[in-house]
Structures are given as C-alpha cells and as structure tokens.
Amino acid sequence: MGLRSVVASALASGAAFVFNRAASRGGRPGPLLAFVLGPGVEEAAKTGFALAMAAPVVVVHLGFGAAEAVYDASGRRGRASWSGPGFAAGAVSLLSHTAFGVLTQAVLALTRQPLLAVTAAAVAHALWNVGIVALMDAGRRS
C-alpha cells in the first residue's frame, strides 16, 4: 500500500469516525444514520480521498476496511478481541469495504462518473447494513 493510499484511507476513516460519532452522539445509530447517511458519507469519503490523492480506489477502500476491522476487533472498549465476535466483525469489515471498493471501481471504469460510483457503493452499503441488522435481530430472537 503506497503512502497516498495510506493517507487517503486514514483521512476517510477519520472523517467517517467523526461523522458517525457526532451523528449518533455516542449512542446507537438510528435508521437514518445506519442506512442512509453513514454509508453515503463513508463511500464518499473513501472514494473522494482516493480520487483527490490519485490513490487506487480499491486499495483505499481496503485500507478503510482494515482500520474498521481493528476498531471492531478492539471491542470499542479498549479490550482487544482477536478471536470470537470481535475478530469476525473485523474480518467482515475488511471484506465488505473491499467489496464496496471493487463495486465503486467497476462503476467508475464503466461510466467515468464518480457520483454514480459513490451512489452505487452507498446503496450497496446501505443494503448490506439492512441485511446485517436483520441477521443480528434474528439471532437475538432465536
């Protein structure tokens, strides 16, 4: 991963963290944040910083996923959990954000329209979040 990719990933991660923390006021995110605003801001930040810094889009999305994976594995309480749910959540973050990057790059290659590419990734990300929440709710009920 080149320096531009690392910097773009770090800036996107920081922007998303600040936005999500402010929008949720430190509590659980509501539906608007989880399914619309959060995915939109994250996808715009990842792709925007990648394009602004001439860094590979997929690599920046992967770097963002890696940062989120570490955050997820940390248990958000300072206790590292490199096995069990924390590790699983981190692995899923890495894979899903990389997949969003592949989608973004594919739409960019086909259309040369960054806004369309970000929109496609944000919609995919929002649908992903809906699916994850549904799975978590189903797991709690069983």
Image (tube, grey):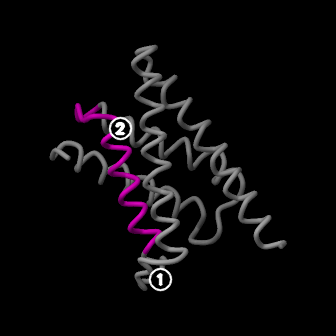
Secondary element at tag 1: loop
Residue at image coords 50%, 74%: 86
- Up-down relation of residue 127 to residue 79 (above or below): above
Label 2 element class: helix
Task: Please report the residue visible at 70 percent of the width from the left and 50 percent of the height from the top.
Answer: 130
Q: Is residue 137 magenta?
A: no
Q: Position of residue 126 (x, y in %)?
A: 63, 44
Name the residue beneath numbered marker 1.
77
Q: Which residues are magenta?
A: 52-73
Q: 12 left or right of 38?
A: left
Amino acid type at image mark 2: Val
Check disc 2 and report the residue beneath it: 58
Q: Earlier in the sequence, mark 2 or mark 1?
A: 2
Label pair 2/1, CB-CB below 8 angstroms: no
Residue displayed at 19% across by 42% down: 4
Dominant secondary structure of the residues highlighted in magenta in the image: helix
Residue at image x 44%, y 18%? 113
Badge 2 crowding class, 10 Å Cα cut-off, few under 14, some 14 to 19, many 20 or more, is many
Between 126 and 32, which is closer to the camera in this rendering? 126
84 vs 46, left or right, is right
x and y, in percent, of residue 66 in the image: 36, 58
Mark 1, other Cα within 10 Å: few <14 / some 14–19 / many ≥20: few
